[in-house]
Image (spheres, helix red, strand yellow):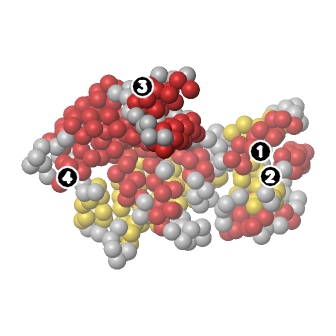
Amino acid sequence: MPLRRRGGVVELAPLGAGQLASARAWAQAGLDVARAHEGLPRAALEEALDAAVAPADDATAADRRLALGCKRLLLDACDFATPDAEGAEALRATLFNAAAQARAQGRFVREQVIAAVAAERGLGVDDVERLLFADLAEAHPVAALDVRDADELLRRWQVGRIQAVLLRATRLQVTVDATPAQLRALLRAAKLRQLLFDVDMVEGGVRLRIEGPLALFSSVTRYGLKLALLVPAIRACRRWHIEAEVKLRKDRTIETFVAAGNDGDEPAPDVELHPIAAKLNDDVARARGPFTAAPASDVLRLPGAGALVPDLVLTHGSTGEQVFVEILGFWSRSAVWRRVELVERGLPFKVVFCVSERLRVSEEALPDAATGALVVFKGALSAARVVERALRLTAG
């Protein structure tokens, strides 16, 4: 991947006007080919893309990489139908057994064996030929194309370039100017990936500092993958700036990678709740108790102390009073103690913090606090205990 190093900073090398025009032309040609191959096997699509997205014989290495990237993105944007694998295996077994028997009896004729198996299964001969290896990837038919136009494909390529660098990242800082929906999508994506982060309100936006992997993973690449998966949510923001510590060189020297943009004409991506939060939300709803539950849509700003990012908000059915819920199942022990300190200093919101038992924090750390409570859980998080703590906070 083309990179530019200057002043101790690593950046993505920008595309020249000619490269950008070639990329757009290849993207459009590839889209036309993919749409024309709907219902046809993957192998046929790949062969057609090789012909349509082809750099000139004297093309530079950069142009060849660009063409290869366009083809890869086009294939990734295709949905391929998944056939009945067991049916294909069973058909092969039946056909091969029939062929073996015919050969042993000295009367093997390929067409006759296929016709006999087709008749036995109520299929046409052509159907047997088509279904025989239908479970192989190259035989999967193109079912749909998940991309609108060439410009969208090029945006995905830009996302992929940043993601490729962040695969080697050990630390990430993101500053964004975002709508509430865009910010919520970004923070929820970070929680879904179980990334440890701090949030600070800064001039013109929000800064998200994501710490290194040592407490969680021994593999930098595995951690970098989690960081890379945040890129679509970052680029959806109105303005964004990335600064990351990366290990790109063979000697694993740490370098600083930066990228920035104002891509925010895209809608905030839909990001699901973390599974623990989603289950708690459903359990509270099923209990039909004093609270209703919903995914939290606010970032709780704490002047001089950053911000909290709750997962859920519980609303009391009679009073309308709200209690936020933040789940700290995968966070560090120090993060829990920072929240305890916030409560002791006078947290302006009522929050139930749900803490994994493995973090070794007792619920007695906040025994009678007016605005905060701890629920320590092992395995499944009890909705009844969370509601009980929320009731205590609203009764105060």
* Residue 341 falls in image quadrant: bottom right
Q: Mark 2 and 1 residues: CB-CB less than 8 Å, in contact? A: yes
Identify the residue under disc 1. 280
**Number of residues whose C-alpha sits closer than 10 Å to that of mark 2, classed few (under 14), some (14–19) or many (20 or more):** many
Q: Mark 1 and 4 residues: CB-CB less than 8 Å, in contact? A: no
Percent of width and height locating residue 75: 37, 39
**Number of residues whose C-alpha sits closer than 10 Å to that of mark 4, classed few (under 14), some (14–19) or many (20 or more):** few
At horizontal 37% and vertical 59% (from top left) the residue drawn is 165
Q: Quadrant of the N terminus?
A: bottom left
Label 1 vs label 4: CA separation?
50 Å
Label 3 vs label 1: CA separation?
52 Å
Percent of width and height locating residue 337: 72, 66
Marks 2, 3: nearer the viewer? 3
339 to 145, vertically: above or below:
below
Instruction: Decide which of tag 2 and tag 3 comes sooner along the chain.
Output: 3
Instruction: Decide which of tag 2 and tag 1 comes sooner along the chain.
Output: 1
Percent of width and height locating residue 353: 76, 55
At horizontal 50% and vertical 62% (from top left) the residue drawn is 222
Q: Which mark is residue 364?
A: none
**Number of residues whose C-alpha sits closer than 10 Å to that of mark 1, classed few (under 14), some (14–19) or many (20 or more):** many
Q: Which mark is residue 62?
A: 4
* Residue 108 falls in image quadrant: top left
Which residue type carries mark 1? Answer: Leu
Label 2 vs label 4: CA separation?
51 Å
Instruction: Decide which of tag 1 and tag 4 comes sooner along the chain.
Output: 4
Compare residues 256 and 368 and report the one nearer the observer: 256
